[in-house]
């Protein structure tokens, strides 16, 4: 009997061991990728987390981290860098699977996104110029302090403004804020510790006399309820990288004292900036010209059709023309582009249940076409109405049809009156391409901003961009005027 009880006890213990091993094995089983390739989006200019190096490739903590996790977990990714706001909107619209962009995990964002485990804990630091006598918050009394609007830095400074008696100034971009401190327009600034330390490694003559303030944690995110396996794989991969030391290597590569990200060419001169970035600038210029030319050609067609409707004897066509012009001209171009790029896919998904992403170039072309078409329609209407009304009456009294009169008599005279305004509209359309960068399109202006995010040479870079726009617009204007004379 005793032997039987011992045998049964050992059998029961063996069963428990096998069962627990099975449960552990089930728990340890990593999820399998559902998609053959995951589209990851990120910011375009948030060094050292993501930025373009002098070869035109995106590098940084986020870029290396997500690639290392993908390799470790065995799933494939493609990465694009439309910019922070554009990246978040792209994921919400279902045009990308996930975002990694130095994004702080907040309760408000948890309503929209599912987050991974935090992969970086951020601090905010106060920076001053080297040699400044500011050594504590109390020394800021009567000083001007800058921070980027909407950030943890701005919130901290706003909450403590009364206590320490400084003037708070808001900025949209780090480069402009850093230039203001360097020029003396600011006495101090506050920004993310990693970004500040990277700027110092790139030659900024700043000091950080006060220890940092905790500001939050960064997370990898997907649209709420979507791609749960991607979050699990990211968490598993992050834990593995921390365990084998690869995570620390990535962080120290960009935040260590001996940063390996410096350019091999001196970018503190205009010649150095051009020689080191001319390929990116030419690529941005080509995108700008392509966008301007294609959209203006389409806008001309739309404008002529709508403009002809505005002077049509058919009342319904005139009403349609008036509504089109008023609606398109009454909405800012940036909002039109954002609605087409992000709003339309969401609308189509809600109606059909299928994701229908729109390419950024296509969205930009449509937005510029509609905007330009509305203004060209008014040019056409004004040109036709500038032709003396007696010519239409004389032609019609001779029995010539309305269509023939317009084609043979009115329009040829109106074209001469319209040409100068067409040239002006083309120049405006070329300049308006800078607005399309708001949806993440990397045209010439956005290219310049990306380069500035790496080297902080904002004055020289914007001077180069200004000269490029001036040259290309002058050449195209001269060409258009020559065609006008002919």
Image: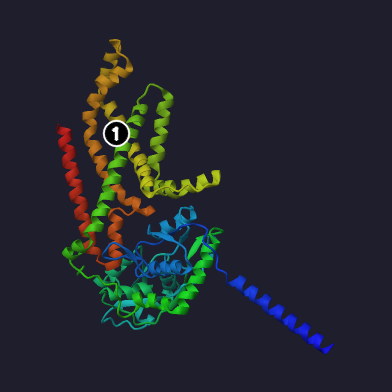
Whether 247 is drawn above or below 228: the answer is: below
Task: List x then y, in percent, for residue 205.
Answer: 26, 76
Q: Is residue 251 left or right of residue 207?
A: right
Label 1 sits on residue: 379
Query: Which color scheme does this rendered protein use?
Result: rainbow
- SS class of the residue under badge 1? helix
What residue is at 24 percent from the left and 59 percent from the top? 462
Task: List x then y, in percent, for residue 239.
Answer: 50, 75
Whether 400 is drawn above or below 203: the answer is: above
What residue is at 36 percent from the left and 28 percent from the top? 310
| Residue that sits furthest to the bottom in the current view | 2
The quadrant in which residue 228 appears is bottom right
> Relative to the observer, which residue lies in front, 263 or 6?
6
Q: Is residue 298 left or right of residue 269?
A: right
Q: Is residue 130 visible?
A: yes
Whether 482 is drawn above or below 170: the answer is: above
> Relative to the observer, which residue lies in front, 79 or 461?
79
Q: How many marks?
A: 1
> Relative to the observer, which residue lies in front, 48 or 138?
48
Whether 434 is drawn above or below 197: the answer is: above
Task: List x then y, in percent, for residue 100.
Answer: 44, 64
What residue is at 23 percent from the left and 58 percent from the top? 279
């Amino acid at each position: 009997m005793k032997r039987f009880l011992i045998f049964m006890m050992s059998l029961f213990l063996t069963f428990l061991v096998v069962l627990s091993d099975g449960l552990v094995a089930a728990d340890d089983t990593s999820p399998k990728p559902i998609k053959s390739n995951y589209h990851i989006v990120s910011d375009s200019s948030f060094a050292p987390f993501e930025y373009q190096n002098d070869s035109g490739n995106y590098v940084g903590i986020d870029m290396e981290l997500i690639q290392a996790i993908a390799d470790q977990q065995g799933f494939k990714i493609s990465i694009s860098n439309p910019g922070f706001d554009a990246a978040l909107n792209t994921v919400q619209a279902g045009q990308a699977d996930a975002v990694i962009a130095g994004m702080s995990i907040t309760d408000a964002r948890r309503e929209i996104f599912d987050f991974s485990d935090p992969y970086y804990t951020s601090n905010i630091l106060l920076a001053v110029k080297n040699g400044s006598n500011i050594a504590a918050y109390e020394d800021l009394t009567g000083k001007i302090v800058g921070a980027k609007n909407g950030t943890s830095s701005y919130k901290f400074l706003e909450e403590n403004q009364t206590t320490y008696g400084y003037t708070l100034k808001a900025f949209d971009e780090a480069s402009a804020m850093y230039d203001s401190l360097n020029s003396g327009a600011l006495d101090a600034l506050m920004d993310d510790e990693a970004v500040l330390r990277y700027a110092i490694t790139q030659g900024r003559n700043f000091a950080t006399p006060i220890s940092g303030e905790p500001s939050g944690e960064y997370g990898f995110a997907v649209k709420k309820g979507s791609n749960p396996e991607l979050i699990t794989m990211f968490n598993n991969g992050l834990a593995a990288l921390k365990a084998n030391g690869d995570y620390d290597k990535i962080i120290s590569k960009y935040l260590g004292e001996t940063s390996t990200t410096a350019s091999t060419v001196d970018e503190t001169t205009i010649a150095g900036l051009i020689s080191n970035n001319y390929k990116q600038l030419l690529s941005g210029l080509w995108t700008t010209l392509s966008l301007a030319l294609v959209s203006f050609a389409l806008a001309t067609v739309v404008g002529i059709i709508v403009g002809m409707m505005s002077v049509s004897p058919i009342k319904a066509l005139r009403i349609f023309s008036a509504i089109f012009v008023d609606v398109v001209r009454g909405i800012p171009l940036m909002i039109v582009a954002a609605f087409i790029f992000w709003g339309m896919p969401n609308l189509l998904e809600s109606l059909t249940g299928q994701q229908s992403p729109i390419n950024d170039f296509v969205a930009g072309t449509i937005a510029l076409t509609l905007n330009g078409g509305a203004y060209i329609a008014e040019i056409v209407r004004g040109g036709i109405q500038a032709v003396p009304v007696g010519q239409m009456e004389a032609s019609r009294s001779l029995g010539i049809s309305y269509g023939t009169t317009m084609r043979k008599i009115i329009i040829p005279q109106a074209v001469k009156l319209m040409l100068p305004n067409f040239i002006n509209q083309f120049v405006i359309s070329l300049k308006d391409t800078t607005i399309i960068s708001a949806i993440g399109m990397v045209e010439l202006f956005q290219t310049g901003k990306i380069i500035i995010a790496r080297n902080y040479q904002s004055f020289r870079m914007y001077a180069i961009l200004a000269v490029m726009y001036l040259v290309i617009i002058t050449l195209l204007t001269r060409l258009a005027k020559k065609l006008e004379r002919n």
